[in-house]
Image (tube, grey):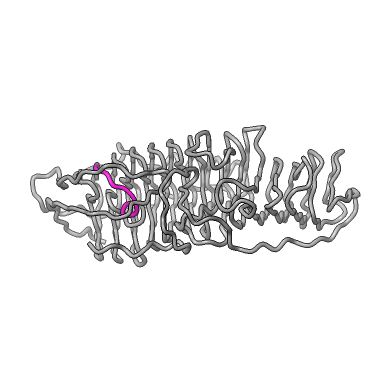
Amino acid sequence: MKAKEYRQKITTISITMGLIISLAGCGSSSKTNDTATTSISATETTSQATEESTSSKEASSDSTSEAGSESTSESSKATSPSTDSITINETVSNSGDGEHAITADGESLSYNNIKVEKTGEADGDEADFYGENAAIFATNEGTLTLSEIVVDTNGKHANGVFSYGEGTTVNISDSVITTSGNCSGGLMTTGGGTMNATNLTISTSGNSSAAIRSDRGGGTVTVTGGSYTTSGKGSPAIYSTADITVNDAELTSTSSQGVVVEGKNSVTLNNVTLTADNNSKNSDKSSWYQAVMIYQSMSGDAAEGKASFTMSGGSLTNANGDIFFVNNTVADINLSGTSIVNNDSSGVFLRAAAAGWGNEGSNGGKVNLTADNQSISGDMIVDEISGLNLYLTNGSTFTGAINSDGAAGDVYVELSGGSTWTLTGDSYISGLTCDTASINLNGHTLYINGTAYTEGSASTGEAITFTSSSSGSKGHDGKPGDGSEPPSKPDGDGKPPAKPEE
């Protein structure tokens, strides 16, 4: 498709904001309105964008082996673009608070071989839900096609590329996005928008700045190839209040969780290399660190209902704490042929437990964990107000203990297709379905509703039924880890409130 001619103008925008509600530990701050100046490096104010050139660079990997995971990693590294690899013909800059360098408002636009620079700040719902202050912004069923561009932002709530609203689509490929301010994601999707990304290099260094990010109203995000890295507190590689799928890519977080799913939303990873080092916190709502967190904050930013995390092939490497943590929601976790390594010997594989989100006494985690041809190593802890259905299928292996300190929440374990469980400590569960060769007690005792299981015997049990809504207070308590923000007025369905008139 031929790139569309575009005209940049000098504009002044004054925005009066009402109630300010902040996201992910991002509070309000004093704000000044600047005149936004959009400049192009060429002398003309109107210029013809060059022809779009999009190349698909897919990583090749084996979805069921460690060697395949390594292949995916190396291919992703080899194909991820850098600023040096992209030819820049023009530069578009904007420094105004709340403004954009590029906007597609109900129209179709294409850009390639440009650099976009954005400074200026914003706060609250206008930025988090509606895209104020994003460097590149699409809305009102607009379509943006971006190829071989460089985006650099430095300001609070200065997201790189933002898709807002149903019918709005952003397609971006072979590009580099760098953000350095707090609350500044690389890709941001809200209000039902669509984001399609191929072969990007994204790096964020601010707090609460996920590389792949969504907020109220969510949408659909598909990412293929590339490298996505975060280094700030409260900045996972992915923060999902949407349906997000990532294929053949590298995800790295050096301070936060690798992935966070909130509420009735999903993350699917196919042949992805995920590396997480969650070593900092924004609040005292939870004392545990983890690679993947699934929860419901009750802020209203995500609809209540069953969350989902699926990982097929690739690898997950955790540096600190637990692999999975589920709190205040029902969650499906599906794992298939993924290499999972926890380098923290004190961490567990799964923790389903109460924390600081929701109402005390009813805010545990309810988990359906299905392993298909999957190796699992590490203990599982399910507290007294939580529950777990563990399904080991198709030759899966589990080496670990469940609630080794004694009975707590209900736990049902089902082994089929030649799957096995080797205990590493005494374990306490409420139900078991297995054949005679499924359980290796390994010198320990397995208690089923208080009765010791006899090794070599078959067993038939019944799975636990979980309701799909969570319980909790409706006050705004931030994203992983911030309880200091002012109350919001959540509607509980994850949809953005009506946008104020301009």
Residue 76 shows in the view:
no
Q: Quadrant of residue 178?
A: top left
Q: How many marks?
A: 0
Q: Which x, y percent locates residue 28?
A: 33, 45
Looking at the picture, tell me which residue is in the foreground, 29 or 456.
Answer: 29
- Front-most of residues 372 and 265: 265
Residue 285 versus residue 219 in the image, above or below: above
Residue shown at 79% from the left, 38% from the top:
424
Please give the range of residues in magenta: 120-127
Q: Is residue 401 left or right of residue 100?
A: right
For image coordinates 77% across by 56% down, the residue present is 414
Instruction: Say whether residue 42 is left or right of residue 270.
Output: left
Above or below, 482 against 309 in this view is: above
Name of the residue lying farthest toward the left: 43
Q: Residue at x 88, y 56 (%)?
A: 458
Residue 289 visible in the current orientation: yes
Q: As displayed, is residue 181 above or below residue 130?
A: above
Q: Position of residue 444 (x, y in %)?
A: 85, 40
Q: Looking at the picture, how far across and down is residue 491, in whole percent?
A: 44, 63
Magenta run includes residue 175: no
Image position, residue 124 (x, y; %):
34, 50
Q: Which quadrant is home to the C terminus?
A: bottom left
